Image: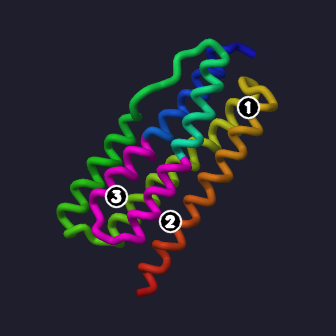
């Protein structure tokens, strides 16, 4: 196993967590609704925790943790800004944008677990699986919130 490949996989996960953190900071600003602000703070906190664990692992391997976000994350935030402006901070639109972001995060973790297992130690795989479980639970919270909005 090469550290370089492992660091690359871990940095991809750091980047997607950076995307989530920034996305939820944007979403928090876009809504006036306290229940959404609370939810977005919780979702951001999940990514802060995951990011810290991943950064510690990258440093342990002698790598440099990724900073910033992916282009798709920037696109996601810009799209959320545009949608919020056009829809008057519509709750349904904001939740749909968040769910899209959650799908991207979940998929990124799943790809790492499917395609990069040979570059990860058993401990790293366990950490990533645990983080994936947290992100999946967050995804499901957003999805159930969307379903409630759709039912109204």
First along the sequence among labels 2 and 3: 3
* Residue under the image location 54 percent in, 27 percent down: 11
Quarter of the picture holding the N terminus: top right
Secondary element under disc 3, as helix, strand or loop, is: helix
**Measured Cα–Cα span from mark 3 to mark 1:** 32 Å
Dot 1 crowding, Cα within 10 Å, few <14, some 14–19, many 20+: some
Numbered circle sitting on residue 28: 3
From the image, tell me which residue sits under label 1.
124
Q: Residues within 10 Å of mark 3 (few under 14, many from 20)?
A: some
Tell me if 142 is positioned left or right of 149 in this view: right
Residue 127 is left or right of residue 106, and the answer is right
**Looking at the figure, which quarter contains the C terminus?**
bottom left
Residue in view at x 57 percent, y 34 percent: 52
Badge 2 vs badge 3, beta-carbon distance below 8 Å: no
- Residue 108 at what x, y percent from top left? 56, 42
| Residue occupying image coordinates x 50% and y 57% | 42
Give whichever of 34, 98 is nearer the camera: 34
Q: Which residues are magenta?
A: 19-46
User: 17 or 100: which is nearer to us?
Assistant: 17
Front of the two marks 2 and 3? 3
Q: Going by the image, does 83 lie left or right of 120?
A: left
In magenta stretch: residue 70: no
User: Which sits earlier in the primary sequence, circle 2 or circle 1?
Assistant: 1
Q: Is residue 69 above or below residue 81?
A: above
- Residue at label 2? 142
Looking at the image, residue 8 lies above or below residue 39: above
Look at 40% across and 34% down and name the residue there.
69
Q: Nearer the viewer, residue 8 or 27?
A: 27
């Amino acid at each position: 196993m090469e550290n370089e490949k492992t660091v690359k996989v871990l940095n991809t996960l750091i980047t997607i967590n950076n995307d989530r953190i920034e996305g939820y900071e944007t979403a928090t600003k876009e809504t006036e609704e306290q229940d959404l602000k609370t939810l977005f703070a919780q979702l951001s906190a999940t990514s802060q925790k995951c990011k810290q664990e991943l950064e510690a692992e990258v440093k342990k391997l002698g790598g440099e943790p990724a900073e910033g976000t992916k282009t798709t994350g920037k696109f996601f935030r810009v799209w959320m800004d545009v949608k919020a402006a056009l829809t008057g901070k519509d709750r349904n639109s904001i939740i749909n944008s968040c769910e899209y972001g959650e799908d991207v995060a979940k998929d990124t973790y799943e790809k790492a677990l499917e395609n990069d297992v040979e570059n990860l130690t058993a401990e790293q795989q366990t950490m990533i699986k645990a983080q994936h479980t947290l992100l999946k639970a967050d995804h499901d919270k957003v999805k159930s919130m969307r379903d409630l909005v759709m039912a109204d």
